[in-house]
Amino acid sequence: MEKTLNLRVHKRSFNENSNLNEEILINQKDVPDVIIGDVVEIYHIEDEESRLLLQVTSLSDEFQQKGTVSIEQSIANTFQLRAYKDVIVKKVDPKGVALDLVEMLFKDQYFSRSDFWRMRNGIIGTCVYLNKKIEHAEMRQQVMEMWSKGERVMCGTITEETRIVYRSSTAVVQIFIQMSSEMWDFDILGEDLYFEKALNGFLTDLFAKWKEQNCQHDVTIVLFSRTFYKAQSLDEFPEYMRDCIVCDYKGRYYQDFYRIVVQNERYDDWTSTMILLRKLCNSYKDKILNYHKQKGHKAPAAYNSTAAQGNFLETLNMSLNLFEGYYIDRNFDRTGKVAVVITPGAGVFEVDRELANITKQRTIDCGIGSDLVCMGEQPLHAAPLFKFHNKLAKTSLEVGDDYNIPHWMNHSFYISKSQIKARLQGSFIPRIKPPPEFNETQRRPSERKLLAHSPNKQIQDENNIPFVDYDEYDAQIWKLPTPNSTRFGSLKFSYQTRRQPQTMAEAKQIKKPRKRNVSDDYPSMAVEKGERRGSPAINIPTLSRSSSSEDISSSVGCYPIIKKPSSKESNESAETDDSFFMRRIVGSAESPVGYSRKHIHQAKSRRALINPFAPSRMQFKMTSNRRRWVHAFPTDPQGAAVQTHHYHMYNKRESSATLEKKLSRDSLKMSQLSMDMKTQSSFSNFDSTEKFSEKFSEPSSLNRIPSGLVSEDKFYVGSVDSSPTSSVQNLERLFQGSSLTSTLQHNSASDLGSLGGRGMKKARENRSYLWGPTGEQEWSPDMTTGQDWFPAHGCQTDSCLVKPILTADIHSQNFCAGISVDWKSLTMPASLPITTDYFPDKRSLENDYTVSQYTLIPEDVNSEFYSRWSLYQSFHSPPVTEDDKFYRRQPLSVTELFRELISQRLAQGFQIITKKKPPKQPLDTMSVGASPQFQHTSSLIRARPRSGPQEEIYLSIGLIFHKLTLSGQTIQVTQYRPRHEQRQLKYLYHYRFQVPDSPSYDVSTSQFKNEKLENYNWNYLDQYICTRGEGDYGLLDPLKYWRSRFFLLPCNNPATRKIIEGNDSIWPRCDIYQTRSKQELQQLISGFVRFLETLNKMRRTAQTRRQKHSGDNVSSTPTSDQQTSQASQKEAVLLSVTMASSKLIEAMKDPQTGLSMLPRQTGLPESCFIAEEAVDWCIQNIQEVKDVTSGIGLMQRLQDEHYICHSSGNPQHKFIHGFYLYNIVSPKDKPKSDMYGPSYNYLFQNEWCEVSILPVVRERAEVPLFTMDESPCQVSELWVNQLINDWRVLSGIDTGAQGWGQQSGSRVNLCAMKATLTHKYVQVDVDGNNKSDRPEWASARYHAYYSPNAAFELQLQWMVATGPILQDLVTTWGRKAQACGFHLLPVPGDPFALPSAPDSDPLRGPIFVPLDIASLSQGGKPVFHDLDQVAKSKKLLHFQDEIIKRYGFMPINVCVSETHRHYMSDEQQQYVHCTGGMFILMESSQVTSSPKVIKISSRVSKKSAGELRKDYIARQNSNTSNTEVVTQNKVGFLWSWNFMSSKRWRSPNTGDEIFQDRMLADFRQFCANENNRLKEFWNDFNLMFAL
């Protein structure tokens, strides 16, 4: 169907019912064959290049214009469609315009990985176009890029096979700048220092791109380095330096330093940060190298390490410690996490093997992006490259280097503008940096001997030139062990040492030309046959014997292939010249050797070769780890995933004659290879790694087919590699071109004829390269690092993959290719894809995995709950009334449960294993998946959804695989775990770090360890989901549930505004906060009650609230109606406690002067009221009731006489002052006998947030400041007498009556069971407006007591909730809080978490502010000389408390400990500022430290939190040589920032960064007794104390 219509445009309407909301409006009469859901293509006849695809979602009868089509205006503008011009409207097949990859962009939202999956499911089958905005379940996203068949397109349709990548412009970014010795060297052009290149070049460009793309990341910038010391033993260091000195494997002593520049900052303009960075970089080197110098002490000389020797992996693990706690302190406006390391080197690092394994596994498991940006020149070998520490070099005869290429890192090479200019001018730019001069006199004789064997006689002629057999030397370096060297039973050595050739003449006679042969015993890779040609960077020679074992690279991660029967000659032959014990080995990390299984234990120390100069020759076994990120990358036309900023450039200007010569030479080599292969034994298909067979039916998986077609006139990117390659590579390349195919068929048509369709497809699917995160993009020395706007000279390509990503004009032909830095990843980092394509083969599942299964039947689980639940004693039926349904929510259906089980696994890092849609062919010839491992698992792949609830899905993380099967009303979970569990590795790390606002580098430790994923209790979590968290299964810490903590704080403090409005040049004093009056405190209580009404979703109007006494009313002037009501109350007859209870109840129910009742609400009985309002009504209307205590007593009398009761129906529930719900019992409803039995609504606590409110008893001016018997809590009326006011006792929990925690025959009430004296739990209705596409729920942990003098805590906890929906809920709470006189702010779970704590940030720590007590002494006597220890501690505690209150701090909770008079718990010593931006913890002299200098090992011992903080404070001063300063018991405060409070939470009541800096600076001045301020306050304090 193709129709010519006239184009109209319309603006989108905000009316949901309007047809103008549609993207396209079309008259069905014009296109009768178009139905809803069809995709149409629209374009101008004269401009066929700009084509638009839209999906018809409505065929409204309101649009009756014939011959026209209307498109939404913004879409028409994007695709340059002109109104009133004719366009072609053509119906297209959605499969024909299907997209391969779609990149979605979002901002200021938090999405879990399960949310990504739900969003993906919501857009499958839809049509998308560039910049299209999509909203699903309050989750908003925008189409950023689309790819189809290797090309970037403007529109297309999303199918089941479309891979979707989610990118965030508001992520958590940690930037680490390595300040190694090269930072102060000039770059290759000699124009800039490397740190200038990093700051003025890369970071400046990065911040500019952030601003251009409107990104606002949460950024932390850290400078880090390793400092070595010229010392031979630890004794050479002064005592004060030894805390953090570490000795490495070479005996060198070093320290690691971290300087945090900014932490969790979100700036629009980074100019001030760049100025600070330049300042710190200029002084960093001198400060670090001279940090430990002290007068009178001699410290060893210090020098900075090189980039390769630095603390690179330790730095990555620092960020991993933080990122692994993604579910703790969850904010709702950040998604994504990435660590960026800027190094002046070329990407080569010397690392510890065990730490490398820990880092790799943690990075892959967490799905964290790690970007390495190198300022140095790109080397001629693969990068990044790890060189492992050889810890056995001194004790073992085996020497040499062991390398590893980390595929889990994304790396880039930054090119400065000066380098770009040099390249444009055609100047030669070297890619090797000359090493520093090597002093020949310092070389040891043993090293000289290794290089050459000097003859004893004089050199006379050419044949007497000293001979150095470099090939033989290299052969020993790169040699793979032969079976002879590992089969001890038949091992035969020749201990006769043959004389080495001394001259060239002797060498010519002895040495024979070497031939490259396939190994007799270990054919793990096909190699060249025939003589060696050329001179590659590193060739792998054989030994000079006839039956040699070829040095090969085995498949990493697998044991080789089934062993061939080896010849007797091969078994008995011994190595000549050298025994294998003397051989130098260079191996790879993680690669178990290429021997058969029975010899593994005999040669564990041998590793297969990794040649960093030719990594493409290394064949790797496909693993789930290597495929974890592959679906985040676009693919080329041949289907290979590629990174767009790594670019293979081939210059087309090479002459055609040269090309023909090269191709014909390769063709001959391929023909020779095909003939030679006939005589070789076939390879087994073990481990599903396909090899060559005799019939060539399955091509080698050694290398991926190059991503382009070789033709006579054009070469695609990466199609020709100028470096020497194996014949297999050339064979695959030659099969790409039609002109070469005929040549090959002519030479060996019978052998190569089967190398078509299926064979080539499988070859493409099986290849896995060692280098790169995709595993499908080949590395070569020709790979270049271009730049965004580098013009392409002679480079032609058919793909948009090589075009610039962010700023360049994609339509320009003058833009190219190479992209030096992955700006897209650094600007809008991608989240871990939700899909992957790897699953182990059938044999591996049987041999290497254990299988466990369990079954979930939701009907059985929930029927038990229904049958045993009872609202009243005789109620055992399913819920029928609205109240019943309120407490018993609808359980999940089996389909909803199945979807949620998938969602939970995705949220914990699992990925869905996908498959390509099989073609219509017999099952035995079907290509099942994109990964070769699918060839054995056709029956294990996810089935297509059928009409009934039948579905199967596979998920994986690491080596763990889950299969979820839905069959009817049953869900079966099958878990595949490795038979040999992964060993948990631990690494203890010592370092120094300096946080912002801290004056010194503090000593700390951190532990790095990989997580054992197989220990996660999935059975427990699935039961929790099945019961909706309302049964026996509750949230536990090992489940990693999400949590966000909030504080409710009073706002509108005049002191805050005065400080903010102060003059910048003259800071106003900040100790100006005054104690609130009793009237202000009553206003806060009244506002708090109204806020809890919001939390409980009570819809209460102002008319339903009675006018309270003047102290309670927030509004300053009462209305006329309120004045009339007050007058009528005065005229009414005053009530008395001596009156009959029935009379008091009638007065309470009076509609004019009585108690304000709550409106009728689902889940509550009639005549409900709030306890706090009832007590307040008694004080106003009953003569004898003068205070809260007497009011509580009167209400308790009414409850004892059964006139009122708690709304739950619990007879044991006493009357509690606060937001507790009670109701008046109607006489006609009052039972005559046994009115309150043991059965009642025990689920009431789960649904209603009830808080006990501490009353305001006295004004501060009415009593002395304090007495020696009172604590600060009592003075501030924050103390809860546990013996009298324990809410659990008053609520009837501890009375022994059934019903609260557990009712007879029913489940445990977890909200009640988890409750403590200070905290309660309640269920949260997350999705009250039904915006989500699934049932959602959460719980809240909140303070059981509230005082207007303390903060109120509310912590959300959830497993099944959508981030944006929760964000809307919290935003609503915050808006209501402002109307009640509060502000609701996010706060950390532990504001004073030490960096050494397991779940804390290793680079974050509180700041110690010492209190100068010595300045308070008078007449040379100590300040507390006349008091005993107890009195001294108590007075000091009061003094610190008064200082804190003067600065606007308030306790974070009430005091509830019985022993509060003698000791305050850690939480009770914490204070939060009324603005929510700062925390303070009082450090008194209660806890004493060890009398010796604090050692790092103190972390291992079991200590209380107070002792650990004392140690932390002592270590902050460990750099001084004064031992007394280190060991003395300091008095002061720990200061911490609220890093959770971002700009969106700030207001004039919270202040900004300048306000917070003023507060800390003034507080430090006050505590240091500047201008005698501390002493003056001490004198005033003593004067009040004397009163």
Image (cartoon, rainbow, N blue to C red):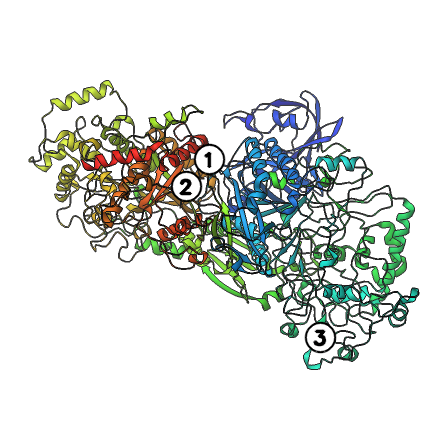
Q: Amino acid at mark 2?
A: Ser
From the image, tell me which residue sits under label 1: 1542
Q: Please give the name of the residue rendered at 74% of the width and 36% of the height, measured from the top-left corner.
A: 420
- Label 1: which secondary element: loop
Q: Is residue 455 visible?
A: yes
Real-space Cα separation, disc 3 to disc 1, in angstroms: 63 Å
The image's mark for residue 1164 is none
Q: Measured from the top left, where is residue 495 in percent x and y?
A: 75, 80
Q: Amino acid at mark 3?
A: Ser
The image's mark for residue 1536 is 2
The image's mark for residue 485 is 3
- Which quadrant does the N terminus fall into? top right
Q: Tell us which disc is closer to us: 2 or 3.
A: 2
Viewer-nearest residue: 530 or 640: 530
Q: Tell us which disc is closer to us: 2 or 1.
A: 2
User: Residue 577 occupies which quadrant of the picture?
Assistant: bottom right
